[in-house]
Image (cartoon, helix red, strand yellow):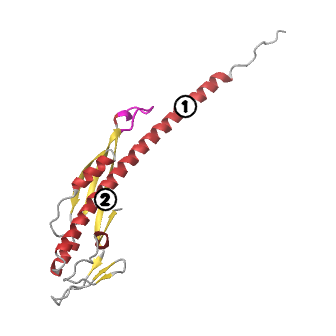
Amino acid sequence: MRLRRYGDSGQAFPIYITVVGGLLFLAFAYLAVGQAAVNRNGAQTAADAAALAAAMNTRDELADQWVQDVSDPTKWLDIFNGRVNVPDSCWRADQLAAQNDATAQCVAVPPLSYKVDAKTNKTVGDSVVPGTESLQSTADATAVIESLCTFPPSGDDSALPELTCEDGRTWKLDPTDPTDLPGPEDLFDVHLAD
């Protein structure tokens, strides 16, 4: 009887190579997913920042308008509801998107919000997933401006109504001394819509 000299030795090596190759492919696939997620997060950051920048600029414009018309309380309601002509602030959205390496398409949505669609300048990049090398990520965001203050209708023309804001502060305004006026952040809140 003749003994086998090698037996089954060496049979595990092809299986080992196949398993290692499969694991490497999975690692590269996870890397591609990670690259796409990072690029998508960059697009969302650009969209959020751009929408907030446009809304905050409009908030500041509304606050400036209120300061100009502080002695005429009949105009206050229109200002707090955004029913006055203030310049479109989409240019700020473009600036912030560019700072986040993206482009933005901004639309003012009356009365007091901005919708921004952002697209990254960078692509997802080369990976084991075909077709990703030219894909750019996109995201959208909407920022809303809300009035924080209320006031009673003015019956006496010599005294300005009290301005009560959501932070619990009451502003007693003196038409002869407009130095102690609330700031834009006291009058309006800017936040991203859900």
Query: Which residue is at a point 36% across and 77% down the rendered structure image?
Result: 167
Query: Which residue is at a point 50% across and 34% down the rendered structure image?
Result: 28
Name the amino acid type tagged 1: Leu
The relative height of residue 26 versus residue 188 in the rendered view (above or below) is: above
Q: Secondary structure at mark 2?
A: helix
Q: Can residue 140 be seen in the rendering of this structure?
A: no
Q: Is residue 183 left or right of residue 175?
A: right
What is the total number of numbered labels drawn onto the structure image?
Answer: 2
How many neighbours does mark 1 have within 10 angstroms: few (below 14), some (14-19), or many (20 or more)?
Answer: few
Q: Nearer the viewer, mark 1 or mark 2?
A: 2
Residue 11 occupies which quadrant of the picture? top right
Which residue bears the numbered disc 2?
Answer: 52
Query: Which residue is at a point 18% across and 81% down the rendered structure image?
Result: 73
The location of residue 80, given as percent across then percent down, is 23, 73
Quadrant in which the N terminus appears: top right
Nearest to N terminus: mark 1 or mark 2: 1
Q: CA distance from mark 1 to mark 2?
A: 42 Å
Name the amino acid type tagged 2: Leu
Residue 107 occupies which quadrant of the picture? bottom left
The location of residue 151, given as percent across then percent down, is 25, 82
The relative height of residue 53 versus residue 11 in the rendered view (above or below) is: below
Which residue bears the numbered disc 1?
Answer: 24
